Amino acid sequence: MLLTIDLDSDAPIYQQIRDRVVEAVATGTLKAGDPLPSTRQLGVDLGINFHTVSKAYDLLRQEGVIRINRKSGAVVRRDHGSGPPDAGFADAWQARLRTLLAEATTQGLSRDDVLGRSQDVLNGFEGARA
């Protein structure tokens, strides 16, 4: 799995790892059953502390994106769109979306630009093509 992070970003490294894995699942780069590198290995590969990777993996586990066990390590748990979202997900997601849309609006993006860019991103995800 090729994963890039920006050490100069304002976003915490664990959040960047979490986001890249979620994006990889959404685009079909990672599928159900695909293994992820161990926390130690990914830490070495990225030049970061393995505890940071562990924090990202724990978030992904809590969100139901991966499962972790002692034998097989971290494995993608499900493909995108494989059933209804967990209770409360849509409301929490909408709250985050509201903030992103507020940022776009305050920076001067038009409604059409926001919708166009949103459609472009959605078109990059396998599950959204149907």
Image: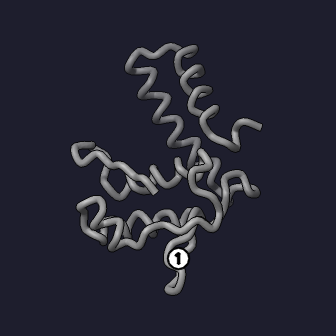
Vertical order, 93 against 33 (above or below): above
Q: Is residue 129 left or right of residue 94?
A: right
**Residue shown at the point (46%, 35%) measured from the top left:** 99
Q: Residues within 10 Å of mark 1 (few under 14, many from 20)?
A: some
Between 110 and 1, the one nearer to me in the picture: 1
**Residue shown at the point (30%, 62%) measured from the top left:** 45
Image quarter (top left, top right, bottom left or bottom right) of the C terminus: top right
Between 83 and 45, the one nearer to me in the picture: 45
Q: Position of residue 68 (x, y in %)?
A: 52, 76
**Residue shown at the point (29%, 59%) measured from the top left:** 46
Which coloring applies here?
Answer: one colour
Secondary structure of the residue carrying tag 1 is: strand
Q: Position of residue 13 (x, y in %)?
A: 31, 55
Q: Position of residue 72 (x, y in %)?
A: 54, 80
**Residue shown at the point (30%, 66%) measured from the top left:** 43
Q: Is residue 75 left or right of residue 88?
A: left
Q: Position of residue 9 (x, y in %)?
A: 27, 43
The amino acid at mark 1 is Ile
The residue carrying mark 1 is: 68
Between 44 and 100, the one nearer to me in the picture: 44
